[in-house]
Amino acid sequence: MKFLIDMPLSPGLADWLRQQSHDAVHALEIGLDRASDEVILKRAQGEQRVAITAVWTTPGSWLWHKLMSLA
């Protein structure tokens, strides 16, 4: 599988996933360490990756609206 690991998760998670034969990148490795949720998710979608994040979304945020549109 293909993964994009978001901040603030450890780059070690991407390392571990690669050790398990997955195609994984961390936001820090690709210059997205300060990117918005929208940029991260669009990049993951464009590369057909699963985005893994520890960010809890709040009502009204871009991510919240995006998730609600998928429901």
Image (cartoon, grey):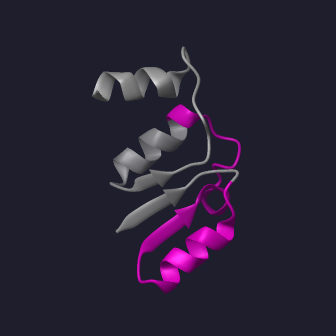
Percent position of residue 62, x then y: 51, 22
In which quadrant of the rendered view does residue 60 lie? top right
Give the position of the C terminus as an image quadrant: top left
Quadrant housing residue 36: top right
Image point (59%, 77%), residue name: 15
Image position of 33 (left or right of 22): right
Residue at the location (50% across, 79% down)?
Answer: 18
Give the magenta range: 9-38
Is 58 covered by the magenta stretch? no
Q: Could you tell me which residue is drawn at 67 percent across and 50 percent down?
A: 7
Left or right? Give the position of 15 relative to 65. Answer: right
User: In the figure, is residue 19 to the left or right of 56?
Assistant: left
Q: Is residue 22 found inside the magenta-colored segment of the image?
A: yes
Quadrant of image for the N terminus: bottom left
Q: Is residue 23 above or below residue 51?
A: below
Q: Position of residue 22 (x, y in %)?
A: 41, 76
